[in-house]
Image: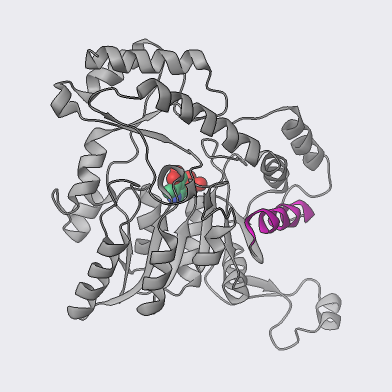
Amino acid sequence: MVNYGKQSLDQSDIDAVVEALKSDWITQGPVVEVFENSLCSYFGASRACAVANGTAALHLTALALGWQTRDVVVTTPVTFVATANCIVYTGATPDFVDIDPITYTIDPNRVEEKVKSLRLKGEQIKAIIGVDYAGHPCDWKALRDIADQYELQLVSDNCHALGASYNRDKQYAVKYADVVTQSYHPVKHITTGEGGAVLTNDSSIDEKVRLLRTHGIWKGSSESKNQKSILSQSWYYEMHELGYNYRITDFQCALGSSQLKKLDRFVGARRKIASLYDQMFAGVDFLTIPRSQRPIRHAYHLYPLQVDFEKAGINKSLVFGKMNAAGVNLQVHYIPVHLQPYYRREYGFKRGDYPVSETFYEREISLPMFPGVTDEVQKTVVSQIKESLCV
Ligand SMILES: Cc1ncc(COP(=O)(O)O)c(C=O)c1O
């Protein structure tokens, strides 16, 4: 069965992991820092803190930015639930802003409207989380301008867009956002099994994230932070904040460093697959292929095809069933977060609140998209879809 996403591993990745496993440290060792340094170089960040997964990266970001009960944080409904859940973890209130119908990323005009209307109601809006959905960067310049004008924090959930560029710049994410989060789940561009990172140019945010990654504990005492006393009391530690164990292991980071070297190649392979889908779907009725509006380089974490099922007079489940019988497991990204039972129940969101996102969801199917997808698989997928549409 071919899924929508899958890791791409080779012998050099396996060798890197084996080497880490044979070393003295399999966790809390030097390989973590090596990976963090390579993340800094590739993404142009002054600091990177590798963590257990992308959800932990978001949680630590929310804590480091000091979100609290009275705060409201806005994001897109078209994302994985983890993006919104990190707001809830802190006790702050999640709110949403609809997407742009071309790029499927948060619509900056609507963000500004939302900020103004929340302020009018006396609500304390604290931050915006943009998500580079499917690998298409948000309109980061517009989001930065809004964040500056209204004194908001700006977070980039960059999990889908590793290796993308914005205004011809691959290092755009940390330039515009105060904090950037990534995930290295196997369906993402590079993998560490489970894993993630928080990238920033703000050393105080990085220090908070690091402290909270390890139970809020630091070695040595706060009064005597000079090297001599730490060395003479190597057993001593203090807990300063309520933190977590969100660490990542050395062997995962060995895999991460090995994978990062191939990121440009992986993105190139994804773009080639996308371009073949684009060609094969060109001119087909009822379909919209992924588009872009700005000078961006799409990283194609996903290939989100829009099918106007209503106009075509067919049913999404039927297409999924047919494809399954042909050995292809499609997916949908995403059921809008505000329609999840938890968000409806706890915050009163309902169908109709974010119509662009809802229509997008109804029409969306994610086609197989990872470097191992063959031309044969692409042809099967395309012919099944055309057959279902009777075109
Ligand atoms: C946009 C987005 N944010 C956050 C996450 C969470 O990452 P992880 O699965 O590594 O916890 C994901 C993972 O699917 C994601 O797609």
- Say left or right for 27 vs 156: right
Q: Which residues are magenta?
A: 30-44
The answer to whether residue 112 of the structure is visible from this angle is yes
The answer to whether residue 1 of the structure is visible from this angle is no
- Say left or right for 310 vs 343: left
Give 330 or 288, whichever is nearer the viewer. 288
Is 35 in the magenta? yes
In which quadrant of the rendered view does residue 386 lie?
Answer: top left
Is 161 in the magenta? no
Quadrant position of the C terminus in the picture: top left
Give 144 or 8, whichever is nearer the viewer. 144
- Say left or right for 317 vs 22: left
Total numbered labels: 0
Relative vertical location of residue 318 with respect to residue 133 in this rendering, above or below: above
In which quadrant of the rendered view does residue 68 lie?
Answer: bottom left
Give 17 or 385, whichever is nearer the viewer. 385
Residue 7, horizontal then vertical, whole percent: 58, 31
Q: How is the image coloured?
A: one colour
Relative vertical location of residue 295 with respect to residue 282 in this rendering, above or below: below
In which quadrant of the rendered view does residue 119 lie?
Answer: bottom left
Relative vertical location of residue 140 with respect to residue 22 in this rendering, above or below: below
Give 17 or 144, whichever is nearer the viewer. 144
Residue 282, horizontal then vertical, whole percent: 35, 25
